[in-house]
Structure formats: structure tokens, C-alpha cells
Image: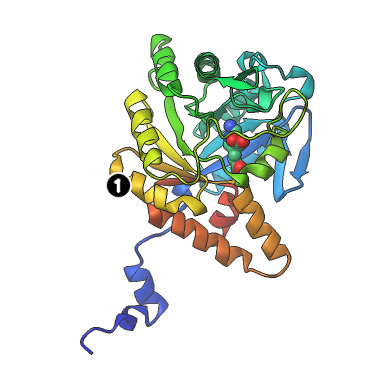
């Protein structure tokens, strides 16, 4: 034998020398759920160890994240039922929860990169990402409101807006409005290849945002989110978003879509993000709770795989756990 692959696996010193991928705190975007109230830290039932936080505790949390070397957050809000409608009115409230959350983070940790979710679902009485008419999601009307929503976040101090709605043309609408209003430096991280996935369940519990029709019957988002069976279309969507002005593109969910991540990484020259979603988090937590899987080992293996597939960054509920382990 002239070649023995095991030579490079003999001990940790040589293994670490030839290792191709390392996870660092720089890789993470930390998703955070915000609620109204004071001193509130509510555990999300289907996301053990993950919480909805009121603004005072959000302030504490981001200081802790910063001390761990985590420098980017992605904000989501849980909107009180009485403020939901079919127009996204509350999403545009300059003093709404998201707008206050952005300011809270910026005041607490000025260096923290603040990204905001842009989609109507937490604000929608139907739980849909856009405006609903006769059971259909109106594309262009929705995109117009979403652009206004992005502008409102920019005015509150968001560094990046992160449209997760999957309406056509919304990146163009958003970029154009931000430019017109002088927000040249506000970036757009587009959820470009976002699939109609069953892995979002726990997130919808967290925000009470599951899609329903007028009779309160559960619906899906398949007329705007992508078919999990489609690979070429993911690249097409992503290239369109880049043309429309996206600074960062995203694939979501993570683990089941790593082939897409690699396709996109090979096809684009902008940073690629991956969202390791709520259901991926829940699966690991549940299996670990049962004693069936080694929590930390599986978590790091999945994060490594996401990065190896081509992700330049990952939005993950494991950010804190992972960073504590690797530091
Ligand atoms: C909604 C949105 C969703 C997620 C992020 N933004 C859910 C959905 O599309 O229904 C999912 C994130 C997760 O599951 O962790 N625009």
C-alpha cells in the first residue's frame, strides 16, 4: 500500500492540522423571540431551553451573547392577538414591538448586528406571510407592505432586514424603497430558497403564527414557499434575489437541504446563510432527552455539515450551546 488514509487520523494533533472546517462564534446569527411585558421568560413548549423574552430580559440576553463572542441577532416578535389583522398594520407601527426591540438591542450592545424578520405572519390574523383575499395570497400588495415594513425596521436602526415571506419581487421593492429613503447601508439578507417545510412547526408555536383560513382550518404555505422536491428552482430563485439587490442569500431549512446549499454556493458570489430551523432543534433536543442521541456531539456534527456544505453563516438556536462547547 502506498497510500494509507489513516496516517492523517492518527491523533488529535494531526486531525486538527488537516481539518477543513471549524465552527467559530463568527459563524452564528442568533434568532431571538420577543414578547410584550416585563421580566418575562417563557419557555417554548416544543423548543426546550429556548424562550420568548420581554424587552428587559432581551437586553440582558444580548449582553450575554456579546460576551460569548456572538455578534449578530435575528429578531422575531410575538404579536398580541388583538393587534393582528389582514393588512400588516401593526408591522408598520413606529412604536411596535419589533421597532422597540431593535432599539433595545442597539442601546444595550451598540456593536451587535441587528437583523429583523420581515414577513406578515406574526401580525396576520391568518398566519400568512402576505395579505389574503378570497383564500389567495396577494403577491404585489404584500410586497408593497413588506417594503414599508423593512423601511420601518431600518428607521428603528436595524442593520439588516431579513425578508422570509417568499413573495415574488419583494427584494426589488424593498431595495428600491430603502434607496429612495436614504437607507443605503441597510442590508438585505433574503430567505431566497425557503422551502414549504414541516420543520417550522415549533417556530409557529413560538409565535402563535400557524397559517389558517377564515374558518380557522389549518392551511399551508405551498403557494409561496418552495416545493421540497425542487433543486434547480432554488438556484433560479436565489439568482433573482441577488439581481434584485440581496446582499446575503439564505437556504432554509438546513439539514435536509444541504445539496441545495452546495448548488447555491457554487452558483453565486455573495455570502450564503443557512437557517437551521426550529424543527431541527426540536428533534435533537427530543432525542437527547430520551437518551437516544448525544446532544452535543450531534449538534456539532450538524453544524459542521452545514458549514461544509457551503454555508458562510448559520442562523441557529444552538448558537449559545455550541459556542460554549467550542471555546
Ligand atoms: C415566517 C418564518 C418562519 C420561520 C422563519 N420565518 C415560519 C414559516 O415560514 O412559517 C421558521 C423558522 C424556524 O422554524 O425556526 N415568515
Tell me where residue 265 appears, x and y as whole percent: 34, 46
Quadrant of image for the N terminus: bottom left
SS label for mark 1 = helix
* Residue 138 seen in render: yes
- In the image, ligand 1 is in what quadrant? top right
Q: Is residue 63 visible?
A: no
Q: Residue furthest bottom?
A: 1
The residue positioned 49% from the left and 25% from the top of the image is: 167
- Above or below, 292 relative to 192: below
The residue sitting at 59% across, 64% down in the picture is: 296
Q: Position of residue 10 (x, y in %)?
A: 37, 82
Residue beneath the point at 70% across and 25% down: 126
Residue 211 location (% of width, % of height) = 68, 31
Which is more toward the observer, 134 or 56? Answer: 134
The colour style of the image is rainbow
Work out whether 181 lies above or below 250.
above
Report which residue position mark 1 lands on: 266
Disc 1 residue: CB within 8 Å of ligand 1? no
Whether 70 is drawn above or below 4: the answer is: above
Q: Position of residue 247 (x, y in %)?
A: 37, 31
Amino acid at each position: 500500500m502506498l497510500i494509507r488514509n489513516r496516517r492523517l487520523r492518527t491523533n488529535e494533533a494531526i486531525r486538527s492540522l488537516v481539518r477543513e472546517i471549524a465552527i467559530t462564534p463568527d459563524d452564528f446569527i442568533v434568532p431571538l423571540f420577543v414578547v410584550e411585558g416585563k421580566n418575562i421568560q417563557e419557555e417554548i413548549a416544543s423548543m426546550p431551553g429556548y424562550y420568548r423574552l420581554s424587552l428587559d430580559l432581551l437586553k440582558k440576553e444580548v449582553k450575554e451573547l456579546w460576551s460569548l463572542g456572538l455578534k449578530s441577532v435575528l429578531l422575531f416578535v410575538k404579536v398580541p392577538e388583538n393587534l393582528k389583522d389582514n393588512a400588516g398594520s401593526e408591522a408598520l407601527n413606529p412604536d411596535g414591538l419589533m421597532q422597540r426591540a431593535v432599539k433595545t438591542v442597539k442601546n444595550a450592545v451598540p456593536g451587535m448586528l441587528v437583523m429583523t424578520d420581515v414577513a406578515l405572519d406574526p401580525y396576520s390574523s391568518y398566519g400568512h406571510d402576505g395579505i389574503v383575499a378570497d383564500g389567495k395570497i396577494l403577491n404585489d400588495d404584500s410586497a408593497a407592505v413588506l417594503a414599508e415594513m423593512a423601511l420601518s425596521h431600518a428607521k428603528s436602526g436595524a442593520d439588516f432586514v431579513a425578508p422570509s415571506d417568499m413573495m415574488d419581487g419583494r427584494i426589488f421593492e424593498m431595495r428600491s424603497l430603502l434607496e429612495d429613503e436614504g437607507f443605503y447601508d441597510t442590508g438585505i439578507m433574503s430567505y431566497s430558497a425557503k422551502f414549504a417545510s414541516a420543520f417550522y412547526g415549533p417556530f409557529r408555536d413560538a409565535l402563535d403564527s400557524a397559517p389558517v383560513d377564515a374558518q380557522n382550518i389549518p392551511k399551508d404555505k405551498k403557494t409561496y414557499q418552495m416545493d421540497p422536491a425542487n433543486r434547480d428552482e432554488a438556484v433560479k430563485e436565489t439568482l433573482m434575489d441577488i439581481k434584485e439587490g440581496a446582499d446575503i442569500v439564505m437556504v432554509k431549512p438546513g439539514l435536509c437541504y444541504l445539496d441545495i446549499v452546495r448548488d447555491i454556493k457554487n452558483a453565486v458570489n455573495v455570502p450564503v446563510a443557512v437557517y437551521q430551523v426550529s424543527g431541527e432543534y426540536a428533534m435533537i433536543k427530543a432525542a437527547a432527552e430520551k437518551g437516544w442521541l448525544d446532544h452535543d456531539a450531534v449538534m456539532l456534527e450538524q453544524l459542521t455539515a452545514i458549514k461544509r456544505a457551503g454555508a458562510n453563516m448559520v442562523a441557529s438556536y444552538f448558537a449559545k450551546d455550541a459556542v460554549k462547547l467550542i471555546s
